[in-house]
């Protein structure tokens, strides 16, 4: 048995027969007084023993209002401790919690609640209840609504209960039959669902991905086996819990490692949260890393010449060592000493400014990240390592690790996972991280794999001789120009986004004679750049037509084109006067481009790019 097979066997053995309730019981027993959950800037830390006691009370309360084993509970709530607690309360009943994105439309919410036949709906307060009020008559099987904040529900077609009342009822039930809670969770098996996650999707109805206890625990075991971080490490939770990354890194992995989660309810306060916590590991979607890089670049550019020169020299030394490690080569002692000196004298303050000074593993995923951004951050002394996966693979299916990585790739398969390419380049995966299936409206679960266990991911890639995977595109997002050229929009967009002024870009060209682009400015960097250039009104609508800014964007397009083959090059572009967000509809909640919506919404702008 080779090393990879041995590691896979060890991971399988460690994850076998484990459930999330069993791990929480272990934490409350063996690590009772260790911190488990905290909200940023609040004195509300719960120990593992205290957290489990609250979970037990809420679990009992949910049972009292009719949430049954196997039943579904929808949650629409911001990131706050109650979200963690009631989610785990449902899990301890053998029920299946599902968090929904707050950016979904009314029709989408109606579809999700009806599709999973939700028995209980948990809402944060009055605003959320108002969103759901018109949907409630269409949900005849919904038994109760739980309101987290004190809210006057008014007249509703479904009975409501306040979270405080639910906890009181659960506490009374727990005192009347203290063994009921223990009996319920001990009956749960690893193959049972632990959560239902609806993929946000760029087109069509969302799919309900069913993940088992074994799926999420195996992912946590794999992470422990491939990335060495301290025991009981602190982490920052800032993504929505409807996102598989936050589910894994904010709930299941901390339970497995008995870590300490600090909730950052407001993503705009992420940097202060990182500074406060100083985590050893952190996962950021590409836009987070791009903004960090742009912020440091802006600060260095505004510094005195001597400071800029010192940063350039320190970055060059650090990047030299990074390139050697990426190539699998040793770093000479003399170079290592120079890197240590550069970090101590120049780079450490910048790392500390970002809250990354204690970073052991920094990950990026969910979308491509420009290699130039990775290299810039590596020169800062922060190795951001790409991973790849999807909700259906419980997060990561492949991973770059600090000891073995290759820039521009998404790493090698996780222990126990198999990856191969179909004839058309589509990536196929098989192994213990593949989800149980897609929930059907009738409550059954449809397999996501073929007869041999392979999941067709829809991503297209290439694999090198050492097993490192590179994602080249989405199978259904390839641009095919009118001359028949197949072009990857993701590569073009990544090169454009590498410029700090560009927040988002979408390449256009399907069934067109050549490639063009719609560009959205970074709403933080662009005004700072404008002020540095003496532009009086640095707002996005004004900047979108400013000659100085357009010249800078043209330079960015030219730089991207220099790295592209002639058919891939952007012939013309349009800078749009407003931002793209999940709320405005151009992005999914996980910040992926909704290409169909963008093309439809900006069809007139696109047509003008081809009028010449």
Image: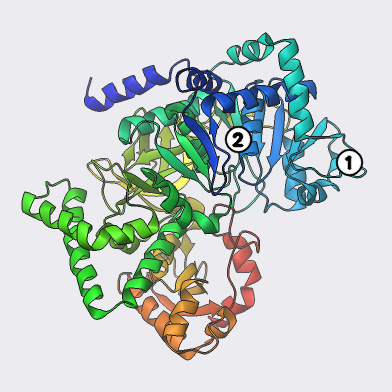
Q: Is residue 270 above or below residue 544?
A: above
Which residue is at 33% across, 69% downward? 564
Q: Which mark is residue 234?
A: none
**Image x and y of residue 236, in percent:** 47, 45
**Image x and y of residue 259, in percent:** 44, 33
Judge whether residue 110 can be spotted in this image: yes
Q: Is residue 520 above or below residue 245?
A: below
Query: In the shown orientation, is residue 358 left or right of residue 260?
Result: left
Q: Name the residue at the front extreme.
A: 43
Mark 2 or mark 1, whichever is nearer to me = 2
Q: Is residue 372 above or below residue 80?
A: below
**Image x and y of residue 7, in percent:** 29, 25
Q: Which residue is mark 1?
A: 137
Coloring basis for residues: rainbow
Judge whether residue 513 can be spotted in this image: no
Between 104 and 266, the one nearer to me in the picture:
266
Q: Quadrant of residue 4?
A: top left
Q: Tell me the quadrant of the picture where the N terminus can be found.
A: top left
**Image x and y of residue 575, in percent:** 52, 78
Q: Name the residue at the right extreme.
A: 155
Q: Which residue is mark 2?
A: 84
Q: Residues within 10 Å of mark 1 (few under 14, many from 20)?
A: few
Q: Earlier in the sequence, mark 2 or mark 1?
A: 2
> In 3D space, how far apart are the residues under numbered discs 2 and 1 (Cα atoms)?
28 Å
Q: Is residue 70 above or below residue 492?
A: above
- For label 1, the SS is helix
Between 511 and 583, the one nearer to me in the picture:
583
């Amino acid at each position: 048995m080779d090393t990879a097979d041995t590691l896979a066997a060890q991971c399988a053995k460690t994850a076998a027969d484990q459930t999330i309730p069993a791990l929480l019981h272990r934490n409350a027993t063996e690590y009772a007084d260790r911190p488990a959950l905290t909200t940023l800037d609040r004195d509300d830390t719960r120990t593992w023993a205290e957290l489990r006691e609250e979970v037990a009370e809420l679990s009992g309360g949910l049972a009292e209002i009719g949430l049954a084993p196997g039943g579904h509970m929808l949650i629409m709530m911001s990131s706050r401790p109650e979200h963690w607690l009631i989610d785990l309360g449902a899990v301890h009943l053998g029920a299946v919690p599902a968090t929904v994105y707050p950016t979904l439309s009314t029709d989408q919410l109606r579809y999700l609640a009806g599709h999973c036949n939700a028995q209980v709906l948990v809402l944060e307060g009055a605003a959320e209840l108002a969103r759901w009020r018109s949907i409630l008559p269409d949900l005849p099987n919904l038994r109760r609504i739980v309101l987290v904040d004190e809210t006057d529900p008014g007249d509703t077609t479904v009975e409501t209960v306040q979270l405080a009342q639910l906890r009181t009822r659960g506490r009374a039930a727990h005192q009347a039959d203290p063994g009921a809670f223990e009996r319920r969770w001990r009956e749960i098996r690893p193959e049972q669902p632990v959560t239902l996650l609806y993929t946000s999707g760029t087109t069509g109805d969302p799919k309900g991905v069913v993940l088992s206890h074994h799926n999420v625990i195996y992912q946590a075991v794999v992470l422990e086996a491939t990335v060495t971080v301290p025991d009981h490490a602190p982490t920052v939770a800032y993504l929505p819990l409807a996102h598989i990354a936050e589910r894994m890194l904010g709930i299941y992995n901390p339970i497995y490692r008995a870590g300490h989660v600090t909730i950052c309810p407001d993503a705009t306060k992420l940097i202060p949260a990182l500074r406060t916590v100083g985590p050893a590991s952190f996962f950021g979607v590409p836009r987070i890393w791009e903004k960090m890089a742009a912020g440091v670049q802006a600060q260095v550019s505004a510094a005195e010449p001597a400071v800029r020169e010192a940063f350039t020299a320190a970055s060059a030394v650090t990047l030299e060592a990074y390139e050697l490690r990426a190539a699998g080569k040793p770093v000479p002692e003399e170079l290592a000493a120079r890197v240590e000196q550069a970090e101590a004298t120049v780079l450490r303050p910048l790392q500390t400014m970002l809250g990354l000074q204690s970073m052991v593993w920094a990950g990026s995923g969910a979308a491509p990240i420009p290699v130039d951004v990775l290299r810039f951050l590596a020169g800062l002394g922060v190795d951001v390592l790409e991973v790849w996966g999807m909700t259906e693979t419980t997060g990561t299916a492949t991973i770059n690790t600090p000891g073995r990585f290759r820039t521009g790739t998404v790493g090698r398969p996780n222990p126990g996972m198999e990856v191969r390419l179909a004839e058309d380049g589509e990536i196929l995966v098989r192994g213990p991280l593949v989800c149980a299936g897609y929930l059907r409206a009738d409550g059954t679960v449809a397999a996501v794999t073929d007869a041999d266990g392979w999941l067709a991911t829809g991503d297209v890639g290439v694999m090198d001789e050492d097993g490192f995977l590179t994602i080249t595109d989405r199978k259904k997002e390839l641009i095919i120009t009118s001359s028949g050229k197949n072009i990857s929009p993701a590569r073009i967009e990544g090169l454009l986004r590498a410029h700090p002024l560009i927040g988002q870009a979408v390449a256009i060209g399907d069934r067109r004679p050549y490639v063009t682009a719609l560009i959205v400015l970074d709403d933080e960097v662009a005004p700072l750049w404008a002020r540095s250039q003496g532009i009086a009104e640095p707002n996005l609508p004004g900047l979108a037509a400013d000659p100085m800014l357009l010249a800078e964007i043209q330079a960015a397009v030219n730089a991207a084109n220099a790295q592209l083959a002639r058919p891939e090059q952007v012939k013309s572009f349009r800078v749009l006067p407003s931002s793209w967000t999940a709320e405005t509809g151009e992005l999914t909640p996980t910040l992926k481009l909704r290409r169909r919506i963008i093309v439809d919404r900006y069809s007139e702008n696109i047509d003008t790019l081809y009028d010449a």
